[in-house]
Image: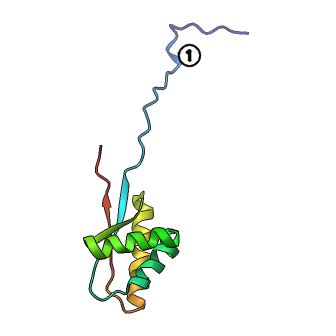
Amino acid sequence: MTRRTPTDPQHQTQILERSETQRPRLYRVLLLNDDYTPMEFVVMVLERYFRKSAGDAEMIMLAVHRKGQGVAGVYTREVAETKVAQVTQHARSEGYPLRVVAEPEPTP
């Protein structure tokens, strides 16, 4: 068995520094109010695409109606963008102008 000396540059141990992993930035998916999309359709979207219970979907829909927008969910960027695209495509296929946007969560 050969022993390697620490002064031999070919046989020195390399030290890997671990950097802290950061959590990915999260994005809020918002439903925006309009005068044409039926409330029932908004509730259905929340239940189907965001897996909200009937009660939660109703509360979010009322926030959209009364405050102009409501948070459907908070996701990583890729998931948020996918949900925006899916909901927008479904709304357009039904003839509704429902607007869905993703925006970064405020940093603490």
Residue 106 pos. (x, y %): 28, 51
Residue at numbered disc 1: 11
Q: Quadrant of residue 61?
A: bottom left
Q: Is residue 34 left or right of residue 25?
A: left
Above or below — where is 60 with respect to 87? above
Query: In this picture, is 64 found above or below 76?
Result: below
Work out whether residue 103 can be spotted.
yes
Packing grade of label 1 (10 A; few <14, some 14-19, many >=20) is few
In which quadrant of the rendered image does the C terminus lie? Answer: top left
Q: How many labels were placed on the picture?
A: 1
Residue nearest the observer in this picture, 4 or 27 = 27
**Left of 104 or right of it: where is 21?**
right
Q: Going 35% across and 74% down the picture, which residue do you hit?
A: 62
Residue drawn at the location 30% of the way across and 89% of the way down: 36
Q: Is residue 90 left or right of residue 51?
A: left
Q: Position of residue 26 (x, y in %)?
A: 38, 54
Q: Residue furthest bottom?
A: 95
Residue 74 image point, x, y percent: 41, 59
Q: Residue type at mark 1?
A: His
Task: Specify the quadrant that holds the N terminus.
Answer: top right
Answer above or below: position of 17 versus 102.
Answer: above
Q: Quadrant of residue 76?
A: bottom left
Residue 43: x and y in percent read 44, 78
* Residue 31 visible, this orientation: no
Q: Secondary structure at mark 1?
A: helix
